[in-house]
């Protein structure tokens, strides 16, 4: 966790753009949520076929980026997260902000299992990584 | 926001049916949530390949419609929303209600950015549209 | 409800494995949430094309299983649910737990309509099935 699902029309992004967006989502999320190990940031691109996306009842090419994140961050952090993700998406894709929706949706840490462990509360990442010896897999909660 | 994701087996709906459903979801959502501009209602059809959907451990052709909506509406509104969407889906597709699941899932307004702005609380739509001058894009929160 | 969406790279699972996973998710969910009729457990496999999934900014083959469940279960139940689902997924697929994320996300019962009815609160399943005479469709809340 987090898992960011990016829904967009098929063929809109190149492989390089997807790679760049995945890297930037990871950077932005980790910069704003102290202690999230980079390896925990998942990004999925979900490309819709022609005729599958609408807005206001009309065919639409809008992008929808929805992140499932651990509960426990402040409203300020969450709002800043969607702001930076919007700016990044507009910058990388050239898409107008009128066609970009970004949302984050909270899930309780103890409702999530990753690497075989229930997730820690916000602020407990480093001790959690140490306790479960996840460093042996290259997991690092200090950056 | 909202974003309604309709998961159904591939090939079940024609292009016309998708268009009609997208229009009707938009009408129903806007009629029940005073002030949501039509342009904010997103609908995505997510068609599963054969062998990808199950219910009760058996292959299933059920449709699942899940809407991500702004938090703040009453229970009465949310229940009426899923009721009308179910009726509409059954009517347009001819699918039995035993094969239709409709759910709405709440996201905090300030956890969402659209048109480059954090979303307003319920009831603040018209002043929000005015404040950010979204009328210049054809956004209208009065219907 | 529940609806479990399993996101994984295309071609990773055989038809038999999908069938087995769907059956096991159903068993695990029903065993832990007294009274959920088997027919209400939906499973969708969502296969991503090559180049569509990332973790830590790098291409990833991780599986993400996210269940939308009725609110009202205890933390203990929810944590046990993600634990058993993780173990099952690792066992059936042979995938390492470092590549498995399982989460459950709560939705209020009255925000969901299924079989044409709003869902009951936790513990009210049997009387709800009786009240709406769902037994005539083979719905059984006693196992």
Image: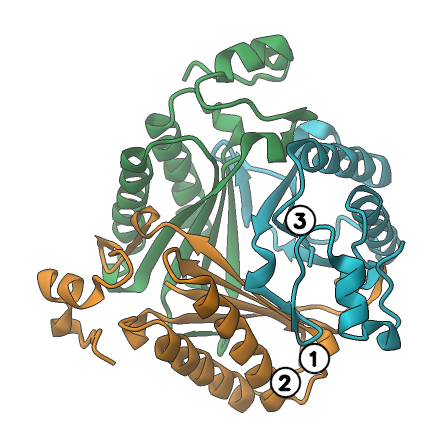
Chain colours: A orange, B cyan, C green
Numbered disc 3: secondary structure: strand
Is the C-beta separation of discs 2 and 1 under 8 Å? yes
Count neighbours of disc 3 (C-alpha within 10 A) and say few if under 14, some if 14 to 19, many if 20 or more: many
Q: Chain of mark 1?
A: A
The x and y percentages for residue A3 are 44, 64
Picture residue at 55% right of the left edge, 31% below the top: C109
Quarter that holds the N terminus of chain A: bottom left
Up/down of A87 relative to C54, above or below: below
Residue identified by numbered label 3: B9
The x and y percentages for residue C67 are 45, 45
Picture residue at 43% right of the left edge, 80% below the top: A28
Q: CA distance from mark 1 to mark 3?
A: 32 Å
Quarter that holds the C terminus of chain A: bottom left
Residue identified by numbered label 1: A97
Total numbered labels placed on residues in the image: 3
Tell me the number on the disc at residue A45.
none
Picture residue at 59% right of the left edge, 78% below the top: A86
Residue identified by numbered label 2: A90
Task: Work out whether residue B95 can be spotted.
Answer: yes
């Amino acid at each position: 966790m987090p898992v960011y699902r990016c829904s967009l029309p098929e063929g809109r992004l190149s492989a390089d753009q997807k790679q760049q967006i995945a890297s930037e989502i990871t950077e932005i999320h980790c910069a704003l949520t102290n202690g999230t190990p980079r390896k925990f940031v998942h990004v999925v691109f979900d490309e819709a076929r022609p005729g599958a996306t609408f807005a206001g009842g009309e065919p639409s090419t809008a992008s929808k980026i929805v992140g499932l994140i651990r509960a426990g961050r402040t409203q300020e952090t969450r709002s800043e997260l969607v702001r930076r993700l919007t700016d990044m998406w507009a910058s990388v894709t050239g898409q107008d902000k009128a066609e970009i929706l970004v949302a984050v949706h909270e899930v309780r840490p103890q409702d999530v299992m990753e690497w075989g462990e229930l997730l820690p509360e916000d602020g407990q990442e480093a001790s959690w990584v140490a306790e479960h010896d996840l460093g042996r897999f290259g997991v690092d909660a200090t950056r």
